[in-house]
Amino acid sequence: MVLGASQFNGRPSAVFRARLDHAVGLYKAGVAPDVVTVGGGRPGDRFTEAAAGRAYLVSQGVPSGHVTAVGVGSDTLTSLRAAGTVLHDHGWRHAVLVTDPWHELRSRRIAEDVGIDAATSPARSGPAVHTRNTEIHYVYRETLAFLYYRLFHRSFDAGPRAV
């Protein structure tokens, strides 16, 4: 499952493309038989992050029948709730989350809270991991985001649970 990042008129951002390229490698290595892309769009967007990610994966050789786009959510929690429902509907029980190293702890925790048996495989290339300043920025941001999630979202009803 590739967690979305911005897209521009159907073209994945550099951060999103690094995640998608990592997912292509995992797919080709047989780590997962299918790939799920997640992420909604902003008002006025013609494409969702999920749809842009799906199109990119197909252009990189992943068969279209093996890519499912879940174009819901403007944040990790909302996107993973929607993805959990889709996984449940397909009878899928496990997911490998592809995101950035700084985002993997929070995304795995959210996935588990919404009923997804999740492991992570962070993309270690792309702009999110290029410089020490970028790393510090994302570690700080994700620390605050994780604490916020733990304080305010943990007890919320996460909706249907994937089994």
Image (cartoon, rainbow, N blue to C red):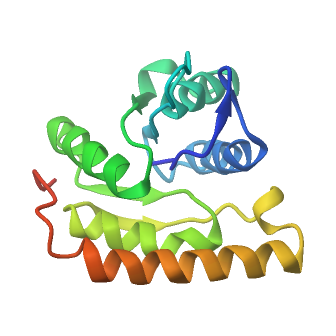
Q: Going by the image, does 83 lie left or right of 4?
A: left
**Percent x, y for residue 68?**
40, 30
13 relative to 146 in the view: left or right: right
Identity of the residue drawn at 82% across and 57% down: 127
Asked if residue 158 is positioned above or below residue 87 in the image, the reply reads below
Q: Is residue 159 rendered to the left or right of residue 26?
A: left
Residue under the image location 19 percent in, 62 percent down: 115
The image shows residue 12 at horizontal and vertical percentages of: 69, 34
Q: Residue furthest right?
A: 131
Which image quadrant is residue 53 in?
A: top right
Where 145 falls versus 39 (above or below)?
below
Quadrant that contains the C terminus: bottom left
- Identified at 44% across, 73% down, the residue is 106
Farthest-out residue, top:
46
Q: Judge by depth and name the residue closer to the eye, 130 or 137.
A: 137
Q: Residue furthest front?
A: 43
The answer to whether residue 105 is visible is: no
